[in-house]
Amino acid sequence: MSLIDAGLRGALIALLLLLAAVFAPQWRHPRHAALVRVALALLLSLAVQALSASPWAEYGLSCAAQAPGIGVSLAISVLFWLFAHAVFDDDFRLRAWHAALWGAVVLFGSGVCWWRADWAVPGFALMRALPLGFSLLALVAVARPWRADLVERRRRWRAVVVAGGALYAVVMVGLRLGSDDGRLGAPAALGDVAMMLALVAWVAWQLLQPRPAGFWDEQLRPAAPAAAPAPQPPAADPQDEALAAALARHMGEARGYAQEGLSLATLAAQLGAPEYRLRRVINQRLGHRNFNAFVNGCRLAEARRRLADPAQAQLPVLSIALDVGFGSIGPFNRAFKAETGLTPTEFRQKTLAES
């Protein structure tokens, strides 16, 4: 059994390092840098955990020698939470406090050998609670924006994160709680590495498949004209064409965006279209990845037009915010400044002065 365990761990570490090598050149990607950096930290931490959780390390090394690996392994739960945000939240940005939180958990786990007797019980309780807590936070980050996500492939990945990563964390905490000394026996350690290898292998298979649009499935740039006429693209779906036209009328002339709390399901019902078709039209034809961002874009465009109108210079900003569909002034101000770099009042003053 020990040889099987060692073989599986070697394969897992090799696969993790392969994925890290694939991600590394994307370190400074203009759009996905945060995701790449979190993914690299997660992959390397999992490699450390695969080594430190082996029976050889847990039973053959002193506590002091194991301490750094324990700290890094414990902090994987923080990286998993950040990874969930980075994958499923287009507005996610890494902050200094994220790194500080990860470092604090590493230090806490690394200090396990030096806990005094009166700290041991609460310390070990916290060690078991942290993975569960961050797994729950990751589930919230994955599930909460699911209905607004317009990227079909990413929507399917949510189920993998929920069923895979979070389930793995819960199972491993349960196995360690069920052991007498908190360490994994040979059968449990073998199950641990087999489960992790299966999950990582599936992710690698999904990520490393060749795709015409590149690693990130981004739109291809138009190719240079060839000497021979290129084949014509397939005709657009007539139902999608009709739905796109109806959507433009509804969100333009009918001001459908002005409904507070507008959801994809509500808009689909108003247009008499299936949700999946409306999601596809907004994502693939209009280029939006998130439904709420699409609606807020419509609202902010109308707000900018009205703030720049001299005839409405005396109309309060709050009235405009409410009229375009925002429920209160706070979210409107934050969304407006995020898009323009100015508050609504600053934008109005600057635009009217220039006109």
Image: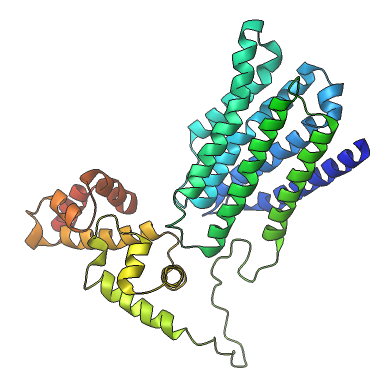
* Picture coordinates of residue 6, whole percent (x, y): 88, 39
* Picture coordinates of residue 167, whole percent (x, y): 64, 42
State the residue lying farthest toward the front: 178
Q: Residue at x 59, y 40 (%)?
A: 80
Q: Is residue 153 visible from the viewing direction of this image?
A: yes
Question: Relative to 219, does residue 232 appear above or below in the rendering?
Answer: below
In the shown orientation, is residue 91 left or right of residue 331?
right
Query: Residue 269's image quarter?
Result: bottom left
- Could you say which is closer to the camera, residue 310 or residue 188? 188
Q: Residue at x 14, y 57 (%)?
A: 352
* Picture coordinates of residue 13, whole percent (x, y): 79, 43
Quadrant in which the C terminus appears: bottom left
Question: Relative to 103, does residue 267 appear above or below in the rendering?
Answer: below
- Could you say which is closer to the camera, residue 65 or residue 337? 65
What color scheme is it? rainbow
* Picture coordinates of residue 206, whole percent (x, y): 68, 59
Query: Residue 156's image quarter?
Result: bottom right
- Could you say which is closer to the camera, residue 177 or residue 291? 177
- Could you say which is closer to the camera, residue 249 or residue 38? 249
In the shown orientation, is residue 245 left or right of residue 212?
left
Q: Residue at x 37, y 78 (%)?
A: 243
Q: Is residue 342 visible from the viewing direction of this image?
A: no
State the residue lying farthest toward the bottom: 228
